[in-house]
Image: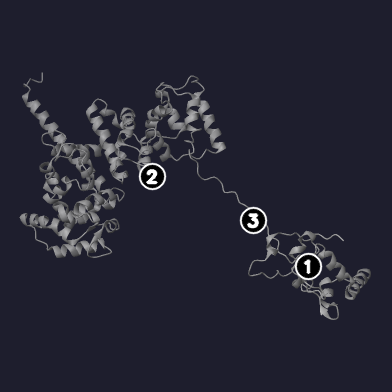
Amino acid sequence: MDIDGVDDVHILDPELLQLPGLSPAPLKPSSHIADELFSQWLSLPETARLVKSLIDDAKSGTPTNVSKNYATTDVSGGSALPAVFLSSSTPPLSPRSSSGSPRFSRQRTSPPSLQSPLRSFKEPKHELIPQFYYQHGRPPAKDRKEQCISMVDQFFRNYIDGLHVHEFKSITKEVCKLPSFLSPALFRKIDPNCTDIVTRDAFIKYWIDGNMLSMDTASQIYNILRQQGCKYLRQADFKPVLDELLATHPGLEFLRTTSEFQERYAETVIYRIFYYINRSGTGCLTLRELKRGNLIAAMQQLDEEDDINKIIRYFSYEHFYVIYCKFWELDGDHDCFIDKDNLIKYGNNALTYRIVDRIFSQVPRKFTSKVEGKMSYEDFVYFILAEEDKSSEPSLEYWFKCVDLDENGVITPNEMQFFFEEQLHRMECVTQEAVLFSDILCQIIDMIGPEKENCITFQDLKGSKLSGNVFNILFNLNKFMAFETRDPFLIRQEREDPNLTEWDRFAQREYVRLSMEEDVDEVSNGSADVWDEPLEPPF
């Protein structure tokens, strides 16, 4: 008699079957144990009565309850049927041996009518994880790719041989959705061999096949500006962008006849970009730093705004004018360098000698100047931005390094007292009421609220809106006195436009002052010319 699963006879447990008169010994060597067990079960009188009862129930139409018949039928002189046959629809699992039962070494599929006491293990389904890393960038979606190709075909329809650099600006702005002044840089990226022409196939190969289309704007600009094989942006990489901006932006048209000031403007913009965004201070701008900054938003605004001074982030000409005029005022011999004696005059001698010494020790930032003991224009740009906007994180870091004399990462009361001693002496010289350092220290602790009262960390400064005033108290007498008197005019300015930074307000005030001084000079010179002319009768 053929029974499914005969090949698995060797895995049956004779103790589990519990048939009377059957020794477990022959189960292991016999290959026909299933046939023998079934024959023995059929020869039992109780089995015959069970089969007859099932047949009678079937003839009479009575619902058949096999489980009940099994449970009420005795085997061999009142002995209960084996537990394997008395189970309900789902049999119990066979007992697990401590040494590891061989019954679990194989899987077995039982007929649907007879449930096997052995568990059937199913292979787990493997879920496919979609690809999330692409070495050369994620390829664009099919519909977006087709839409872009359609636009490219439309632009190149009348330029079968390709586009020249002056014709490429529409592609940069309409297809790539990038600021128009990036057009020359993008053109040179697609045309590395300097053939002065970009064909349709060359553009598609770089922009679509190179997966530039699927990148975010910051990544696109980063890849366009950086040099081949370089993993960061340098100051020189922004020079072509500024050259194009100066040549095309209507707000800078008046500078096109003065190449010297064009160059100074471009340098100032680049210095401001690296001051605020290059937080590592290495001069190497990474993609992460570019994404975290607000440069991309400012660049996109340039195409929308004709007034360059309304773009106060980085590109304002008025801001450049203030910075350069301040530098020119201090540079007495106009050799484009500033020494200690020059810098001490800044802000009507507002700074102390001790803080100026720390600046020239190059602790907060290494000078780019090659002349010993002098700072260059770039160094001055970093200084004035830090001095006039102490609410920004770059400024806080700049002055924190100055005050942290032992460079251990914390500012102690002794270090603060070292700088305040000169400040106190200056207050006495201008007949100001002297303030004890103990009172100043309590005021500083209340303003900052540090985790530890015996020192102040950089994180403590970043968590307080009054951190900039701490440095003014220590080494800037003019701003310290203004803070103590709480000038109502400055308070009203802050409330009128809270989006402006301290630097924005300073540049605004200084530009008005410098403009008025220039107007007075022009009027004075004009009056002198008038008096020098001979008087003539009106007729």
Image quarter (top left, top right, bottom left or bottom right) of the N terminus: bottom right
CA gap between label 2 and label 3 equals: 41 Å
Residue bearing the label numbered 2: 288
Query: Which residue is depicted at the point 37% across and 34% down?
Result: 225
Instruction: Characterize the local packing of mark 3: few (<14), some (14-19) or many (20 or more) Cα atoms within 10 angstroms.
Output: few
Quarter of the figure with the C terminus:
top left
Residue 186: give x, y in percent of width and height: 41, 30
Reading the image, the residue beneath label 3 is 124
Q: Residue at x 17, y 52 (%)?
A: 479
Neighbour class for label 2 at 10 Å: few (<14), some, many (≥20)?
A: few
Residue 64 horizontal side relative to residue 312, left or right: right
Q: Nearer the viewer, mark 2 or mark 3?
A: 3
Distance from Cα at disc 3 to Cα at disc 1: 34 Å
Around disc 1, counting alpha carbons within 10 Å, would you say few (fewer than 14), some (14 to 19), or many (20 or more)? Answer: many
Question: In percent of the image, x 24 and y 37: which residue is there?
Answer: 320
Q: CA distance from mark 2 to mark 1?
A: 72 Å
Q: Secondary structure at mark 2?
A: helix
Mark sitting earlier along the chain (2/1) = 1
Q: Which residue is mark 1?
A: 27
Residue 417 in view of the camera: yes
- Residue 57 falls in image quadrant: bottom right
Is there any visible trace of residue 482 in the rendered image? no
Image x and y of residue 216, in percent: 45, 40
Say which amino acid is labelled 3: Pro
Residue 282: x and y in percent read 29, 43
Upstream in sequence: badge 3 or badge 1: 1
